[in-house]
Amino acid sequence: MGALLSGSALCALGGSFAWADEAFVTNQESDDVSVVDLETTKVVATIAVGGKPAGVSVAPDGKRVYVTSPDGKYVSILDAAGRSLLKKIDVAGGPVGVIVSPDSARVYVADWYNARVLVLDAARMEIVSEVKVGASPAGMAITPDGKTLYVCDRDDDQLSVIDTTNLTRTATVKVGSHPFVVVFSPDGKYLLTANVMSDDLSLVDVASLKEVKRIPTGSTPYGIAFAAGKGFVTAQHADQLTVFDVATYTPTGSIDTPTFPESIATSADGRKVWVTSWGDDLLVSFDAETGKEVDEVAVGKSPRGDGNFIRHTSHAD
Amino acid sequence: MRAMFAALVAGALTLFTGAAEAHGPTRQKVEITIDVAAPAAKTWAVVSNFQDLSWLAPVTKLEGTGGSDIGAERTLTLANGEVVKEKLEKFDPTKMMLFYRMDGDNIKALPVTNYSSRLTVKSVDDTHSTITWWGAFYRGFPNNDPPPELSDAAAIKAVTDLYNLGLGALKTKIESGK
């Protein structure tokens, strides 16, 4: 968030600083990470990580990128600006989901096979603790103060709520079938899970921890992002984005995509959403207002990019 | 096709029958294209019939409902007695593409889980077209360190063998006009 704010301030002052987001896309089949300059839409680096990389999370301070390799059973720590591998951290099990705390000090890694979330200390670059959750933990969301972590327990059809101060599970919330990703609504009042098997989103009230609504989507929803007052959901088997209105949480339409869209994230200026196409080995963007496809970038094989794969930065750094 | 079924170890199967829908972390894909000496419309007429797999030798019986409309279902009985259910999710005559998914897993039929597939026909010229068979799936073993017969490699080989067999048979059927 710091990078985002300083970038915004620079924009307002000089007016000449364009956004220069970068995407760090995990390519599961080609065992590497494509670094894409989202302004020039060129692949500016390819970082070999191995181990069939899936999850990715750019630290909020923009300095590091964390990548999970479930087959290799390790987490790779990348130097974002240097496009280099700093360290591989071995973890028993199958690391998939990954998220970084707002202060960039802690990294939470979901272990798909062992129903736990591991805690990685960013400064020490080692696993320091863990907390038990439900079956096949996947995507996660964290509050802006870093105190509460929400984990998709995919095969238990629930969210686990984790108090990060003492690393205990304080609650679970039943949602739709096989939630893979969870995000906060733009106003922070709700959590939304993408339920891969029930073809819908669960809208969960953060205060009461109750599911209050289901939002139907195209087949096999995998990712959620917000832009221009709308929500965009990758519907993987439909080769579409399902679009919904954020004021009413009702679907308003769909946008055709290349095949098997997977993860989705919003550009720093909020004008575009970027989507990985697992089927066609592409990173593509759509104009959030018009829904028209804007950019198409060839990346590595079978891109996933599950997690916060966009690094917000500016020409100033 | 025989290799596809032989790739399975009966002893391993009983262990995982309760693990439907759980899957490993790495989704795989296979895509194979074959040229057909027939115009695209003729090729699509055969490929687009969701209720006909007479060209796919291991399928001994097909029972279905809904024709080739979205939501159509078919139940396949294979030569080894195993049963597979599939559902049509997308059908686009303009793009000459159909997409379906397996309803539940049956690793005795195919050593994969969460299988979905797309068949696409493209025109090359007035007398030639191509068929592309594309599949997305996870290996048969849902956890780390799979046995060889339920590994990523075994899953990819089984699907590759199936697609090569099926596309070859489709080509013969369409070109011979039978």
Image (tube, rainbow, N blue to C red):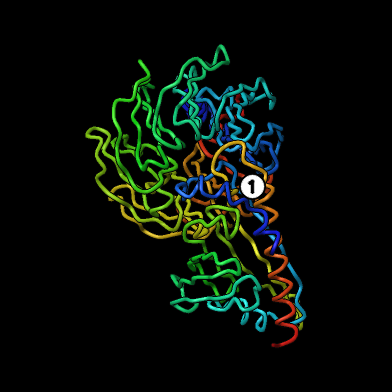
Which image quadrant is residue B96 in? bottom right
Amino acid marked by disc 1: Ser
Question: Badge 1: few (under 14), some or many (20 or more) residues near its Cα, within 10 Å?
Answer: many
Q: Is residue A142 above or below residue B116?
A: above
Residue A70's spot in the image, x, y percent? Answer: 59, 34
Q: Label 1 is found on which chain of the structure? A: A
Q: Is residue A103 left or right of residue A53?
A: left
Q: Is residue A24 visible?
A: no
Residue B25's spot in the image, x, y percent? Answer: 56, 41
Which image quadrant is residue A123 in? top right
Q: Is residue A127 above or below residue A135?
A: above
Q: Is residue B160 left or right of residue A117?
A: right
Residue at far bottom of view? B177
Residue B119's spot in the image, x, y percent? Answer: 62, 68
Q: Is residue A2 visible?
A: yes
Q: Which residue is mark 1?
A: A302
Front-most of A231 and B167?
A: B167
